[in-house]
């Protein structure tokens, strides 16, 4: 594929550790069956049958570096059929062939990285500095990955100490206090290897396009609440007890905070002012692989993946008054064991057992902003009290025989005198109301009022009737804070998988894979069982032509939030089921040209989504059909050209035909990429992306009922460029990169404008 001070402190740690093991050793060839990081077993020197018969994209470290990508989401956007979209929570989401992020399985060295609460993940917090390759399997993928993965499976293979530089680093800077940097240290010996990497991302926010028209909630400069800070520490190592036994360990620590840009006020959706005020996560993996003989190999690992997130909602765009906070903890931990039976010329048979515990705990606190009011009936909440009282005195004169009432004057031939007092007082109690009233009688009117602050209000009033006027006033003071109700969620579930897969590759240029798995979800309420299966085959029809056909049945169980959220959960949800068919052609052409073409059809039922009332339901059947195409050319030395096109037709079978397609799923995606190295070693990488035909739904009231109405997003084109100039070949280079070079004003979701032109300058170095 053509695919600050804080930093200095953590970097110093990495250097200190790295200097202790900068001994490099030549890589020793090992049996690939002992590679624990790969979930799918590689048989021999070629690719496995399952990957040769299905859509599989591999992005290498060199390709990642050429694009200038800094995080995983920037890498994945280069993959045909993958759409990276930023939604309402400000997090990049990975959609594949019409399926959402929760239908995509993300693994790092085989360890699940999705959150236990909603099954999603944030690709922007995974830096490319840790990545050796990204393996993307789409469509009818292997059953050895476990349940879910209807959209696809992404497995990140991290760098190894045996192939990485002894010391390496990068520092990049841009406007608005934007810094991206990393440093790593690596080493290896005959029986061991290790690597430590530290990275840092920080920015005050991203700029708006010059074509953006300012609104009440968003000016034309910096995107409001788009600041971000993330620090990553990663370490891994392995040790060979013998040529047949390997131990591995991986550790990742992540922390940060970031804003979630709100809607700009141009759409129909409700504005939300939210932030992730604290994020801390850690992942640990311990693994073992042992080869008993030429036939049997056992490999497996245990893992613990935990993330703690403190999120807050605010009253308005000032982000000062907190109205809600959620302190959540997601834990995914388990064990994955594989027994590999090498039948030699008869194929490869793999059995797998996965036991995984998913738990989600959250505490939600709601707050009411402190108020003071002198209006009767005002509700005050808080731990404080407010008292108030007022007196009103008044007198008036009138002539004649008439009288005056209220605060007015009377006219006539007589005289009238009067005086009155009005008193009032009120108290405000936490979570309650403060009321007060007083009456004043006489020839004047008296009014009094009290106010309570600190969440409490006190009100009071007095009235007097007569021919004169009276005035009165009162004040009340109080102090304290108030809290409302809290939603506490603490649930867990065990997910079990037993799988078996058989691969066969013939010397007659064909191969096939058969697999089946049974999955069981044990929750606090019930046990739900289901199965997945796949069959794939390929045929090398000619030296330059390969045909493939694959089918699969996949299943995804509801997440913790789907089942147990007190605001939107539904304990009666059924598992999602999907059926997949894919036909592929890979063809080499003259002039160093090759292309791949995959057509697919997917039928998904029991799709889980929110209804018009905001509750999760099994919404019915969705159909996805489309094409992924890519062509590459390397005919000219030092010039690589690539063009890809993805077509997606999505529809809801049982829907009301409100939408022509499912929302936020572009019908057409086009991408053109070019990489060229000039004779003076300057390298340029150009990426042009075009997104077309994307619809979404808005809710409207018709006859007192909520209905959906179709809207369309504007088509957009993005141009990215990366220029690299080596100063010391393979040791030091500087680069200049630009994203959204044409400063396109574009939206990927309703009323959520994306970044305008950004320019970065950086340096890469290694020893």
Image (spheres, rainbow, N blue to C red):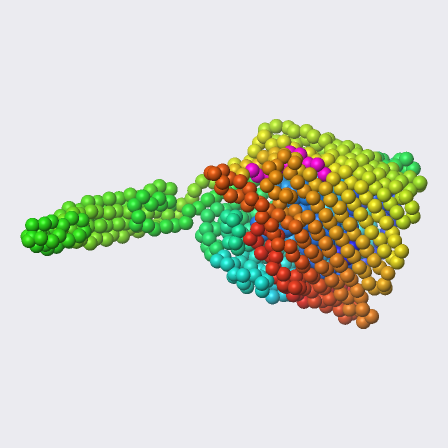
- Quadrant occupied by the C terminus: bottom right
Q: Is residue 433 magenta?
A: no
At 11% from the left and 49% from the top, the residue drawn is 403
Majority secondary structure of magenta residues = strand
| Residue 169 in view here | no
Give the quadrant of residue 177: bottom right
Quadrant showing the N terminus? bottom right
Residue 562, how many percent across, how many down? 59, 37
Question: Residue at 72% of width from left, 38% of height from top?
Answer: 602
Answer with left or right where residue 381 lies relative to residue 642: left
**Residue 149 x, y percent position in the rendering:** 71, 40
In the picture shown, does residue 28 fall above or below 488? below
Labels in figure, total? 0
Q: Does residue 199 appear left or right of residue 278 in this picture? A: right
* Residue 66 coordinates in the image, percent (x, y): 75, 61
The magenta segment is 602-611
Tell which of 443 and 556 is nearer to you.
Answer: 443
Residue occupying the point 38% across, 42% down = 431
Q: Residue at x 84, y 59 (%)?
A: 634
- Residue 180 picture quarter: bottom right
Q: Quadrant of residue 550?
A: top right
Residue lying at the far right in this picture: please name it. Answer: 508
One can see residue 311 in this view: yes
Q: Nearer the viewer, residue 614 or 682?
A: 614
- Where does the image place residue 96, in percent across and percent down from the top left? 70, 46
Specify whether residue 603 is painted magenta: yes
């Amino acid at each position: 594929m053509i695919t600050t001070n804080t930093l200095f402190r953590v970097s110093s740690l990495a250097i200190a550790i790295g200097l202790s093991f900068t001994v490099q050793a030549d890589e020793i060839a090992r049996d690939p069956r002992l590679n624990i990081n790969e979930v799918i077993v590689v048989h021999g020197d070629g690719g496995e049958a399952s990957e040769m018969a299905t859509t599989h994209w591999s992005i290498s470290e060199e390709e990642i570096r050429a694009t200038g990508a800094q995080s995983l989401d920037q890498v994945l956007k280069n993959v045909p059929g993958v759409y990276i979209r930023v939604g309402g929570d400000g997090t990049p989401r990975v959609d594949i062939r019409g399926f959402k992020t929760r239908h995509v399985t993300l693994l790092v060295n085989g360890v699940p990285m999705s959150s236990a609460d909603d099954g999603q993940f944030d690709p922007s917090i995974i830096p490319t500095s840790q990545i050796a390759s990204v393996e993307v399997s789409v469509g009818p993928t292997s059953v050895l990955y476990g349940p879910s993965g209807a959209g696809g499976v992404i497995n990140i293979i991290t760098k190894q100490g045996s192939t990485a530089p002894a010391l390496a680093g990068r520092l990049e800077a841009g406007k608005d206090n934007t810094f991206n940097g990393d440093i790593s240290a690596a080493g290896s010996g005959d029986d061991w290897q290790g690597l430590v990497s530290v990275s840092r991302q920080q920015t005050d926010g991203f700029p708006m396009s010059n074509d953006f028209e300012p609104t009440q909630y968003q000016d034309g400069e910096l995107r409001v609440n788009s600041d971000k800070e993330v620090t990553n520490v990663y370490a891994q190592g392995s040790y060979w007890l013998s040529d047949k036994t390997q131990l591995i360990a991986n550790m990742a620590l992540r922390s940060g905070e970031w804003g979630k840009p709100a809607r700009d006020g141009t759409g129909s959706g409700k504005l939300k002012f939210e932030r992730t005020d604290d994020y801390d996560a850690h992942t640990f993996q311990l693994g073992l692989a042992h080869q008993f003989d030429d036939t049997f190999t056992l490999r497996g690992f245990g893992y613990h993946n935990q993330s703690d997130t403190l999120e807050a909602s605010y009253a308005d765009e000032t982000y000062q008054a907190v109205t809600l906070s959620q302190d959540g903890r997601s834990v995914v931990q388990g064990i994955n064991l594989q027994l590999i039976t090498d039948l030699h010329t008869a194929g490869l048979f793999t059995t797998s057992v996965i036991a995984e515990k998913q738990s989600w705990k959250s505490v939600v606190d709601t707050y009411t902003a402190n108020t003071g009011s002198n209006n009767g009936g005002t509700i005050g909440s808080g731990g404080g009290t407010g008292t108030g009282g007022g007196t009103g005195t008044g007198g008036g004169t009138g002539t004649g025989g008439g009288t005056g009432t209220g605060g007015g004057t009377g006219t006539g031939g007589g005289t009238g005198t009067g005086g009155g007092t009005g008193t009032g007082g009120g108290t405000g109690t936490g979570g309650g109301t403060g009321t007060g009233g007083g009456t004043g009688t006489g020839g004047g009117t008296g009014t009094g009022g009290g106010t309570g602050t600190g969440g409490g209000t006190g009100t009071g009033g007095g009235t007097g009737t007569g021919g004169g006027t009276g005035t009165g006033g009162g004040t009340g003071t109080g102090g304290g804070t108030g809290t409302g109700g809290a939603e506490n969620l603490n649930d867990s579930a065990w997910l079990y998988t037993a799988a078996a897969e058989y691969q066969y590759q013939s010397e007659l240029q064909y191969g096939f894979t058969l697999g089946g798995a049974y999955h069981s979800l044990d929750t606090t309420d019930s046990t739900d069982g289901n199965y997945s299966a796949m069959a794939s085959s390929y045929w090398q029809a000619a030296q330059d032509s390969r045909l493939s056909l694959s089918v699969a049945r996949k299943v995804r169980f509801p997440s913790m939030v789907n089942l147990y959220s007190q605001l939107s959960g539904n304990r009666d949800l059924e598992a999602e089921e999907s059926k997949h068919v894919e036909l592929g052609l890979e063809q080499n052409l003259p002039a160093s040209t090759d292309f791949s073409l995959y057509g697919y059809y997917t039928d998904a039922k029991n799709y889980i989504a929110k209804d018009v009332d905001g509750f999760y339901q099994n919404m019915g059947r969705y159909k996805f059909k489309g094409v992924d195409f890519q062509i590459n050319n390397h005919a000219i030395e030092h010039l690589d050209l690539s063009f890809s096109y993805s077509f997606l037709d999505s529809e809801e079978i049982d829907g009301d035909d409100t939408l022509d397609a499912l929302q936020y799923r572009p019908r057409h995606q086009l991408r053109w990429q070019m990489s060229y190295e000039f004779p003076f070693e300057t390298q340029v990488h150009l990426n042009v992306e075009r997104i077309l035909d994307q619809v979404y739904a808005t809710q409207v009231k018709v006859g007192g009922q909520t209905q959906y109405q179709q809207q369309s997003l504007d088509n957009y084109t993005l141009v990215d460029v990366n220029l690299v100039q080596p100063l010391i070949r393979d040791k030091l280079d500087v680069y200049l990169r630009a994203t959204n070079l044409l400063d396109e004003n574009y939206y990927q979701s309703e009323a959520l404008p994306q970044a305008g032109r950004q320019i970065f300058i950086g340096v890469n170095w290694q020893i």
